């Protein structure tokens, strides 16, 4: 089940504001498991997909790509333990890169995404 960290919702940011009325759609800022960093999330649920984009920022305004540990923390924050969530690497011709340090988590509501055999994962 998809859920967002409501207490971390950005309600007054000039570009990323949202309200409780937006449901699971909106912008959020949560503490990173990596000391000195925060994670900015944009969550959405539309067209049969749940989605969270993530980037890391520190108090000095420096940004970086989230670590595996941070992406696991976001997965656990926004989905249940048994929900399967993926990161896609589409063909380069289909990249949409609006921010160089953002990673995305996706969950399909309509399709089971085929996985490799368990021993390979």
Image (cartoon, rainbow, N blue to C red):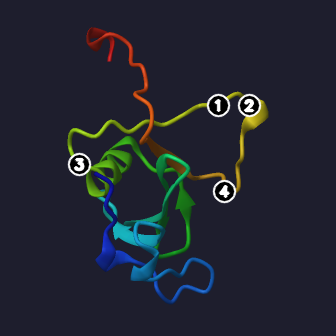
Which mark is in front, 3 or 2?
A: 3
User: What residue is disc 1 on?
Assistant: 90
Q: Tag 2's secondary structure?
A: helix
Which is nearer the N-term, disc 3 or disc 4?
3
Residue pictured at 40% horizontal, 71% vertical = 23
Residue pictured at 50% horizontal, 46% vertical = 48
Q: Nearer the viewer, residue 79 or 121?
A: 79
Q: Tag 1's secondary structure?
A: loop
Pointer 4 local density, CA inside 10 Å: few below 14, some 14–19, many at least 20: few
- Give the image quarter of residue 90: top right
Residue pictured at 29% horizontal, 51% vertical = 79
Horizontal and vertical percent position of residue 103: 53, 47
Which is nearer the N-term, disc 4 or disc 1?
1
Which mark is in front, 4 or 2?
A: 2
User: What residue is disc 2 on?
Assistant: 92
Residue 103 shown left or right of residue 72 in the figure: right
Q: Tag 4's secondary structure?
A: loop
Pointers 3 and 1 in contact (CB under 8 A)? Answer: no
Pointers 3 and 2 in contact (CB under 8 A)? Answer: no
Pointer 2 local density, CA inside 10 Å: few below 14, some 14–19, many at least 20: few
Q: Between marks 3 and 2, how big is the CA–CA gap?
A: 31 Å
Pointer 1 local density, CA inside 10 Å: few below 14, some 14–19, many at least 20: few
User: What residue is disc 4 on?
Assistant: 99
Which mark is in front, 3 or 4?
A: 3
Q: Between marks 3 and 4, how big is the CA–CA gap?
A: 27 Å
Q: Which mark is residue 80?
A: 3
Q: Outermost residue, bottom direction?
A: 12
Compared to residue 121, the image places residue 49 above or below, namely below
Compared to residue 62, the image places residue 86 above or below, namely above
The quarter of the rendered structure image containing the C terminus is top left
Q: Between marks 4 and 2, how big is the CA–CA gap?
A: 15 Å
């Amino acid at each position: 089940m998809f859920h967002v960290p409501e207490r971390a919702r950005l309600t007054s940011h000039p570009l990323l504001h949202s309200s409780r009325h937006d449901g699971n759609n909106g912008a959020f800022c949560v503490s990173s498991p990596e000391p000195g960093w925060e994670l900015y999330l944009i969550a959405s649920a539309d067209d049969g997909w749940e989605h969270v984009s993530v980037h890391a920022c520190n108090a000095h305004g420096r940004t970086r790509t989230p670590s595996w540990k941070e992406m696991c923390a976001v997965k656990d924050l926004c989905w249940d333990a048994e929900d399967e969530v993926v990161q896609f690497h589409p063909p380069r011709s289909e990249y949409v890169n609006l921010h160089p340090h953002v990673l995305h988590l996706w969950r399909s509501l309509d399709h089971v995404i085929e996985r490799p055999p368990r021993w390979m994962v």
